[in-house]
Image (spheres, helix red, strand yellow):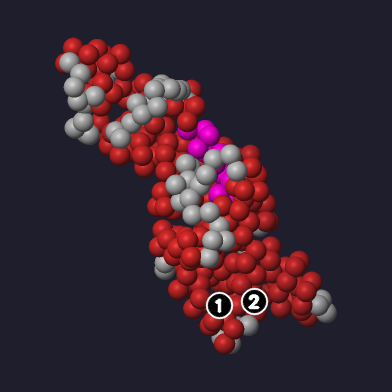
Amino acid sequence: MLGFVIRRLALSIVTLVILITIVFLITSVFPDDPGRSLAGPFASQEVVDSINERIGANDPKAEQYFRLVKNTITFDFGDSFQFNQPVSDTLFPALGRSSKLVALGLIMTLPLALMGGIIAARRKDTLLDRGIVTLGLASSSIPEFVSGVALQYVLAVKLGWFEAVAAPNRGFFGELKFLMLPAFAIVIVYFGYIARIARAGTIQALDADYTRTAYMKGLSSRDVIRKHVLRNSLQPTVAVVGTQIGYLFGGLVGLEVIFNYQGLGNLIYNAAREQDYPMLQAGVILVAIIFMICTLIADLVIAWMNPRARLNVRS
């Protein structure tokens, strides 16, 4: 297992270096003048040149690249162009807010999706199975910002059950009430995808030799499902959930913009729109780190769930 962890960490480091390179190349080709963006359109050229010199915009590209690598290691990206304060002072609070939305969305989605996938697998080729699969396909084909707008209009604007947009200082229960609405949009998108993966894994586990052997030993259906089927059928689901958690932190830009929720995705979107390069670089790299951590944890959980995987790791 230790060798597996070391190999996965090494792969993650290589992936992170490639991502840093891509982020640097993309932000380097932007034609905008950072000094002009900070100083404003009416500032003198001397002021603009002074700002560019201070932030290192005139340094050679190689020096700027290695500075970005150093900033990633220390996670000190300097000051934000938008907020004129350290990037971390805005970035980490936004990460905390996104974490709340992601956690609530997963808490609502995973039980429903796993239960739906397992029930569909046990009732394979029945009307119930087709209904769950069809519902999942229909829901997962709707983009989250579309379902978010529909939920916002019906449940917040028309019925008034929820807050239409985020409001500060509402307390724990006030914030929870607001988060329920964008979390519903996450459920709509991810229920079908996760349920289909769980269904396919459960069908494969139910058809396996060890399952038939367990039934021949006289075990009840509940014991077979709990002790033999779930442990093996949920491995693909764990892998999918691990990758989707990383996506949720940076991929729900449209949902956060619709609900005016100041999360990580919304922050990255505004940084790109305002040419706030330090914030943009830090946000994208942070999402990549979260993605790699989540996939690593998912791989470790799968290796723990699957004895054959552990044997392969040791070998």
**Residue 131 percent coordinates (x, y):** 54, 81
Q: Residue at x 77, y 77 (%)?
A: 221
Q: Disc 2 to disc 1, how far (Cα)?
A: 9 Å
> Residue type at mark 2?
Ile
**Residue 20 percent coordinates (x, y):** 37, 33
Relative to the observer, which residue lies in front, 254 or 11? Answer: 254
Relative to the observer, which residue lies in front, 225 or 313? Answer: 225
Q: Residue at x 81, y 76 (%)?
A: 219
Residue lying at the far left of the rendered structure: 45
Is 190 magenta? The answer is no
In the image, the segment drawn in magenta is: 91-104
Tag 1's secondary structure? Answer: helix
Q: Residue at x 62, y 67 (%)?
A: 112
CB contact under 8 Å: marks 2 and 1: yes
For label 1, the residue is 132
* Helix, strand or loop: magenta stretch: helix
Give the quarter of the image for residue 232.
bottom right
For label 2, the residue is 119
**Residue 294 percent coordinates (x, y):** 55, 46
**Residue 103 percent coordinates (x, y):** 60, 50
